[in-house]
Amino acid sequence: MADHVPFVVEDECIACGSCEEICPEVFTVNETLGFAQVMNPSGAPTDKIQEAIDACPVQCIHWADEME
Ligand code: SF4
């Protein structure tokens, strides 16, 4: 769903690769830049994205609509 999309706070990401491991359809770690990026926000079901959010060791993945 377009209004429920994840994003990564890039400054806080430690590029551990956990989100990509759990949900590679959505997250990709950019080795060059040193943080994860959301490549396809609607590439996986909400619960799978939530699983990646919960697994992030620094809690830097958020739902965009929960930040406003
Ligand atoms: Fe970055 Fe969190 Fe993904 Fe690890 S799980 S790469 S810290 S966004």
Image (spheres, rainbow, N blue to C red):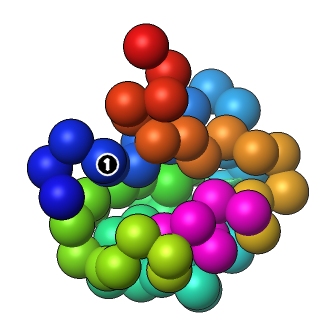
Give the answer, above or below, for where 57 lies relative to 4.
Answer: below
Give the side of residue 38 with respect to residue 41, left or right. Answer: right
Image location (x, y in percent) of residue 14: 74, 49
Q: Residue at x 30, y 47 (%)?
A: 4
Instruction: Look at mark 1 in the image and give the residue it sits on.
Output: 5
Give the answer, above or below, for where 22 lies relative to 60.
Answer: below
Give the side of residue 58 with respect to residue 28, left or right. Answer: right
Q: Residue at x 59, y 86 (%)?
A: 21
Give the answer, above or below, for where 64 lies relative to 43.
Answer: above
Q: Quadrant of residue 18?
A: bottom right
Front residue of 6/29: it is 6
Quadrant containing ligand 1: bottom right
Q: Residue at x 26, y 59 (%)?
A: 41
Q: Residue at x 18, y 58 (%)?
A: 1
Q: Is residue 26 visible?
A: yes
Give the side of residue 54 with respect to residue 65, left or right. Answer: right
Count of labels shown?
Answer: 1
Residues shaded magenta: 49-54
